[in-house]
């Protein structure tokens, strides 16, 4: 009886130790992948490319972090499988992570959709055009470029401001006569 308890304890200790090793290796691999993907995307100058199409987010960092999170998720799944934790727990964890990703995506869209809709309205009304002087809130200057999400305005000081398109619908906008 004592031998059985000792063998069971050793078995659990071995399983837990190997499971923790799986976690450490997986998390270390995730960190390495994040750094490598970031360096590759930085070398390809992804952020400079996407700025030209109007996206001002740090996609290099975002994509590299996403790659590491996927490896973390796979590591946790291997860890749970190794410890023979039922598939229901794995499905719950995967479901929770997917729900978190979906909510994060939706929260990110809360800024994109109003700015895109405002761009459509701006294009339809044709009041704001490139080269026109405008004044919105305390910002005044010449419209340099109207993007899908924001409008570039060059002030009299020579500064370039990026104004979200939704601001033109929310605030009084004055278009100065040329």
Image (cartoon, helix red, strand yellow):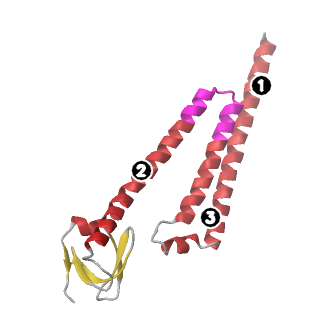
- Between the C-alphas of marks 3 and 1, the distance is 42 Å
Secondary structure at badge 1 equals helix
Q: Which residue is mark 2?
A: 106
Q: Residues within 10 Å of mark 2 (few under 14, many from 20)?
A: few
Q: Name the mark nearer the viewer: 2 or 3.
A: 2
Residue 137 badge: none
- Is 20 in front, or is 140? 140
Residue drawn at (24%, 81%) of the image: 134
Q: Residue at x 39, y 73 (%)?
A: 147
Q: Which residue is mark 1?
A: 10
Label 3 with label 1: CB-CB less than 8 Å: no
**Is 142 on the left or on the right of 66, as rendered?**
left
Q: Seen in the image, is 42 located left or right of residue 16?
A: left
Tell me which numbered mark, 2 or 3, is placed earlier along the sequence.
Answer: 3
Identify the secondary structure beneath mark 3: helix
Residue 168 located left or right of residue 62: left
Q: Nearer the viewer, residue 49 or 17?
A: 49
Query: Majority secondary structure of the magenta segment?
Result: helix
Segment tinted magenta in the rendering: 75-93
List the residue tagged with mark 3: 38
Q: Earlier in the sequence, mark 2 or mark 1?
A: 1
């Amino acid at each position: 009886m004592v031998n059985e308890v000792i063998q069971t304890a050793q078995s659990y200790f071995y399983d837990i130790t190997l499971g923790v090793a799986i976690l450490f290796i997986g998390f270390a691999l995730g960190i390495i992948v994040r750094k490598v993907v970031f360096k590759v995307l930085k070398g390809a100058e992804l952020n400079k490319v996407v700025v030209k199409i109007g996206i001002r987010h740090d996609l290099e960092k975002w994509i590299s972090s996403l790659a590491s999170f996927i490896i973390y998720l796979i590591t946790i799944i291997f860890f749970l499988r190794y410890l023979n934790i039922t598939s229901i727990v794995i499905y719950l964890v995967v479901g929770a992570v997917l729900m978190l990703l979906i909510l994060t995506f939706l929260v990110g869209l809360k800024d994109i959709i109003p700015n895109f809709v405002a761009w459509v309205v701006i294009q339809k009304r044709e009041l704001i055009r490139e080269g026109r002087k405008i004044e919105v809130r305390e910002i005044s200057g010449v419209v340099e470029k109207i993007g899908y999400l924001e409008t570039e305005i060059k002030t009299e000081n020579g500064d370039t401001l990026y104004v979200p398109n939704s601001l033109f619908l929310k605030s009084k906008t004055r278009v100065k006569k040329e």
